[in-house]
Image: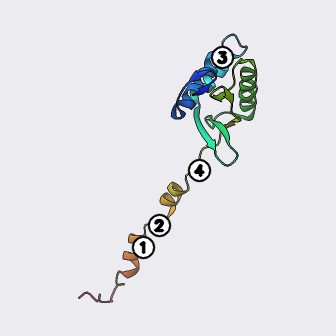
């Protein structure tokens, strides 16, 4: 059975379990309030890198955070993870290779960008085919 910090769960629930366990483990830590504010505002996702067989927890923080905030968050996560007496991720009692990625970058949606920035094809064709002043159209 899969376990995240000792809590059994299914793969779709890994990110939420990880987030909750980080909150639980942060008790009695210095600067806990700052960490709680940041983790509550974050978007945590679980991704399996199947090529390298590494389990990755992606933490997306709002873009309003500075580099110093990221460093604080990273150090806090490392401290909490080392203090935990259980592996971050395990399967049938065997610890699995894992990583945590912390970023303030937003995912780039290429499709959405193209959709917003392309010219309206139908409008441009209508303008191109519209007869100019003094010309007759060739409607059938």
At 58% from the left and 36% from the top, the residue drawn is: 45
Q: Nearer the viewer, mark 2 or mark 4?
A: 4
Kindly report the distance in space between the C-alpha atoms of the residues bearing marks 4 and 1: 28 Å
Precedes in sequence: disc 2 or disc 3: 3
At 60% from the left and 44% from the top, the residue drawn is: 106
Q: Is residue 121 above or below residue 130?
A: above
Precedes in sequence: disc 2 or disc 4: 4
Q: Is residue 138 left or right of residue 97?
A: left
What quarter of the picture does the N terminus occupy? top right
Precedes in sequence: disc 1 or disc 2: 2
Precedes in sequence: disc 4 or disc 1: 4
At 71% from the left and 27% from the top, the residue drawn is: 73
Outermost residue, top direction? 28
In contact (CB < 8 Å): disc 1 and disc 2:
yes
Kindly report the distance in space between the C-alpha atoms of the residues bearing marks 2 and 3: 51 Å
- Identify the secondary structure beneath mark 2: loop
- Identify the secondary structure beneath mark 3: helix
Front in this rendered view, residue 67 or 107: 107
| Residue denoted by label 3 | 25
Q: Nearer the viewer, mark 4 or mark 1?
A: 4
Front in this rendered view, residue 82 or 118: 82
Residue 119 is marked as 2
Residue 108 is marked as 4
């Amino acid at each position: 059975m899969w376990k995240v910090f000792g809590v059994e769960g299914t793969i779709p629930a890994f990110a939420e379990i990880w987030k909750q366990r980080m909150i639980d483990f942060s008790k009695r830590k210095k600067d806990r309030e700052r960490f709680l504010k940041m983790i509550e505002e974050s978007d945590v996702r679980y991704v399996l890198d199947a090529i390298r067989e590494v389990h990755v927890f992606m933490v997306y923080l709002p873009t309003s955070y500075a580099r110093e905030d990221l460093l604080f968050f990273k150090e806090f996560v490392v401290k909490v993870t080392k203090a935990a007496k259980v592996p971050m991720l395990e399967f049938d009692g065997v610890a699995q290779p894992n990583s945590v990625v912390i970023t303030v970058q937003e995912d780039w949606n290429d499709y959405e960008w193209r959709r917003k920035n392309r010219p309206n094809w139908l409008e441009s064709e209508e303008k191109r085919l519209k007869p100019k002043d003094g010309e007759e159209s060739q409607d059938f």
